[in-house]
Image (spheres, grey):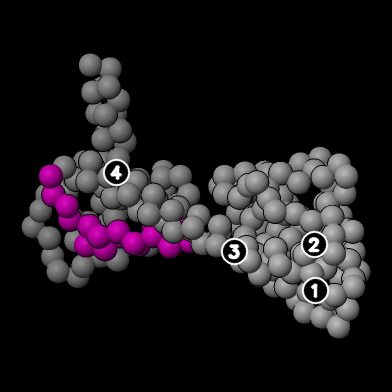
Amino acid sequence: MYARDIFSRPVVRVRPDTPLPEAISLLTEGGFGALPVVDEQDRVIGILTEADALAARGAAQTASVEAAMTVPAEVVGPGTAVSTIASRMITGNLRSMPVVEAGVLVGIVARRDLLRALVRDTAAMTADVRALLDNYAGSRRQWSVEVAEGRAIIRGRFADSDEQRTVSELVLTVDGIDDVEIAADPAPSTRPPTMPLTEWLQQRADESIV
């Protein structure tokens, strides 16, 4: 998932000559953590954060945004990975980052956008893993699924180590899953093993042809 998939728009922005009291009103009334500062061509030249506004409180009534803004602004492109954005926000203690294309402001990503994407991704990946395993095991829902940060934990009973390996390989085919942990129930299973992954995939391919 990339910035283009989660950024918010239209973006409330200010100009360098915007009076600081006006910009502070936009911050507080809109509940924004920061406002991009743009020039006449909508190119991002800085950013006004809550911290910037607080630091300029002594001159807030007479100053302009230019006197208080942070330069340069930390920006990302539409194709920047969400994981990269999250890392940069944490490292820089940022609440939001403007998204620019050819220098022009096209959107903004806030921490809440990242959190929504994380929840949505986790739910979607969990559902995909669950559907694959249900399909593979037939009518027996025999494994529980947990997904967090691209890692899937599959718990339950397995016929043998071959089945554990097959389930692990199957789960790794789900987009976004990078690692699989098999937490096998120690109780012995009397259930016959399910078919090998390659045989199951071939069967599905044959069914699709029919």
Residue at (39, 60) in percent of width and height: 147
- Identify the mark nearer the N-term, 2 or 1: 2
Q: What stretch is highlighted in magenta?
A: 139-156
**In this rendering, does residue 46 appear at all?**
no
Q: In this view, does 67 lie to the left or right of 22?
A: right
Residue at (63, 47) in percent of width and height: 9
Residue at (19, 70) in percent of width and height: 186
- Nearest the eye: 57 or 77: 57
Disc 2 marks which residue?
Answer: 47
Identify the residue at the far top of this view: 210
Residue 140 among those drawn in magenta: yes
Disc 3 marks which residue?
Answer: 111
- Identify the mark nearer the N-term, 1 or 3: 1
Residues under labels 1 and 3: Cα distance? 18 Å
- Identify the mark nearer the N-term, 2 or 4: 2
Q: Which amino acid does label 4 sit on?
A: Leu
Disc 1 marks which residue?
Answer: 52
- Nearest the eye: 42 or 115: 42
Residue 64 is drawn in which quadrant? bottom right
- Identify the mark nearer the N-term, 4 or 1: 1
Label 1 SS: helix
Mark number, residue 132: 4
Residues under labels 2 and 4: Cα distance? 45 Å
Residue 131 is drawn in which quadrant? top left
- Identify the mark nearer the N-term, 3 or 2: 2
Does the residue at mark 3 contact the one at mark 2 (Cβ under 8 Å)?
Answer: no
Q: Which of marks 2 and 4 is in front?
A: 2
**In this rendering, does residue 207 appear at all?**
yes
- Give the prevailing secondary structure in the magenta stretch: strand
Instruction: Work out whether 33 lies above or below 145.
Output: below
- Identify the mark nearer the N-term, 3 or 4: 3
